[in-house]
Image: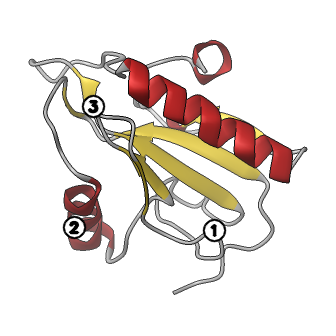
Amino acid sequence: MTALGPIKYLTIHCAATPEGRDVKAATISQWDKAKFGQVSYHHVVELDGKDVVTLPDTVKGAHVGLNNTGNIGICYVGGVDAKMKPKDTRTPAQKATLRQLVGEYRLRFPNIIVRGHRDWPGVARACPSFDVKTGL
């Protein structure tokens, strides 16, 4: 495992799973291990709002290409409709948990920069399927 380094960023992601499909954090971590050789996210927020810590804040994830150093990754289950088109599918419980997590990180790291995956330069995808600046 590689050290995360000083925390400067927090990036919100969606799992790109269809609305309402109850995919668990353990499954997402298995997918990431198969694709990237490691767990990608520090937190996965399940449909019921449960925050599952999947990586400690001291370990670098694999969620924003070459921009993972100092970057906390939070993923919510969902993010697409039944036809796999981007859609903000967050449940009220997921919204509350995401707001809480972001608030906690902002308290711990007052200068943290919060972005959606799509807000990173060179990222050509809709993830997390909502505007992080206005949707938290």
- What amino acid is labelled 3 in the image? Gly
Instruction: Tell me the residue that label 3 is attached to.
Output: 78
Placement of 54 over or under 67, stated as above or below = below
> Would you say 97 lies left or right of 34 here?
right
Between residues 7 and 118, which one lies in front from this camera angle? 7
Q: Residue at x 42, y 65 (%)?
A: 54
Question: Rounded to the nearest whole Å, what is the CA distance between mark 2 and mark 1?
Answer: 19 Å
> Would you say 31 lies left or right of 112 here?
left
- What amino acid is labelled 1 in the image? Asp
* Outermost residue, bottom side: 1
Instruction: Tell me the residue that label 2 is attached to.
Output: 30
The quarter of the picture where the C terminus appears is top right
Q: Secondary structure at mark 2?
A: helix
Q: Is residue 126 visible?
A: no
Q: Alpha-carbon neighbours of circle 2 within 10 Å: few (<14), some, or many (≥20)?
A: some
Kindly check if marks 2 and 3 are in contact, taking CB atoms under 8 A apart as contact.
Answer: no
User: How far across and down, in percent of the image, does residue 68 sit?
Assistant: 60, 62
User: How far across and down, in percent of the image, does residue 111 sit?
Assistant: 89, 44
- What amino acid is labelled 2 in the image? Gln
Q: Secondary structure at mark 3?
A: loop
Question: Rounded to the nearest whole Å, what is the CA distance between mark 3 and mark 1?
Answer: 23 Å
Q: Residue at x 48, y 24 (%)?
A: 95
User: How far across and down, in percent of the image, does residue 82 sit?
Assistant: 10, 19
Placement of 71 over or under 30, stated as above or below = above
Dividing the picture into quarters, in which one does residue 107 lie? Answer: top right
Q: Alpha-carbon neighbours of circle 3 within 10 Å: few (<14), some, or many (≥20)?
A: many
Q: Secondary structure at mark 1?
A: loop
Between residues 124 and 90, which one lies in front from this camera angle? 90
Please tell me the numbered disc located at residue 57: 1
Sequence-wise, the earlier of marks 3 and 1 is 1
Sequence-wise, the earlier of marks 2 and 3 is 2
